[in-house]
Image (cartoon, rainbow, N blue to C red):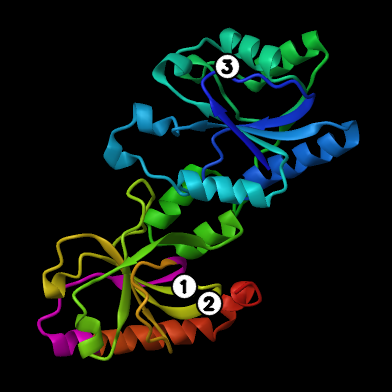
Amino acid sequence: MRHITDEFITLDKPSAITLGNFDGLHMGHRRLIELTKEWAAKENLQSVLYSFNPHPMFLFNHKEHSALILTREEKYRAIEKTGIDLYVEQVFTREFAATSPEGFMDYFFGNLNPKVVVVGENFTFGNRGMGTVDLLQKRGEELGIRVISVPIVNIDGERVCSTRIRSCLLDRDVETANKLLLEPYFTQGTVIEGKKLGRTIGFPTINVHADFNKLFPPNGVYATVTYYDGKPYYGVTNVGYNPTVNGQVKVVETFLFDFDKMIYGENVKTNFYKWIRDERKFGSIDELVAQMTKDTQTAKDYFASPDFDVWRDKI
């Protein structure tokens, strides 16, 4: 996959293009991408995904309300796996955001050489999102360019979108979020040294500071699978501050079943599957150990249950 990122982009090769924010690459996004690839193959065009960096919410929302389902690097890797030919990452500035719908269409149709454009039926563009799919289709017709409006994907009576996935994660409904994403929500990062208390109480853990721009599920304990050196390890993960031992910094701390290696400085990826309980402070280390024993069994029961069957063969 080729990758272009700039404030002003020109494409010479005729293209089938899908455009949007694509945060999370959920089932709706994947439908747009597959349709774009189909039209590219049918019309002998290059397939292009056109998106933005940074995500517009970072420019217009307060930072505490802005968090990515996929970091920039994770998004790049996810798009690469789709088999798209070219990933165009438009540098998104306040000046660019202020472009009128007409100005954006002049730039898009004039510079990116689209022959087929694929968007969701609720796609908006231009200053304050005043541009609509109808407007895009009208300009396309004038230029002889096919603009395809793809119906919204609905699951369980609700629209599939990144906002819904964020809400699911913040409501601890990891299972629904994963269903909409078509893959487990995950965090990844470099293993750092912790307090090493876990080793003294029979629950050695690995600690990770994940990307601060990435959305964390709420503080608590989750059933997870962590990948290290290409191998999966089942476990339980605590997201939070470790209040029982006076934790100050938010970390992703994971106890891996049947794993006892020192891997400081190594990169790991942790898939989240089910919320177990909220984080809380215990009155003693003994109480903490008793609860961790229960959490471990709860996670093992979940991994052995039919609820996990949808993921079992994908581990």
On the question of residue 233 being in view, the answer is: yes
The residue that label 1 is drawn on is 226
**Amino acid at the residue labelled 3:** Gly
Q: Identify the mark nearer the N-term, 3 or 2.
A: 3
Question: Label 3, label 2: how many angstroms apart (C-alpha)?
Answer: 45 Å
Which mark is nearer the camera, 3 or 1?
Answer: 1
Residue 34, image quadrant: top right
The residue that label 2 is drawn on is 232
The residue that label 3 is drawn on is 131
Image: magenta residue range? 268-289
x then y, percent, for residue 241:
20, 65
x then y, percent, for residue 288:
20, 84
Residue 44, image quadrant: top right
Question: Label 1, label 2: how many angstroms apart (C-alpha)?
Answer: 6 Å
Q: Identify the mark nearer the N-term, 3 or 1.
A: 3
- Secondary structure at numbered mark 3: loop
- Secondary structure at numbered mark 1: strand
Check residue 185 in the rendering and tell me which mark sits there, or answer none. Answer: none
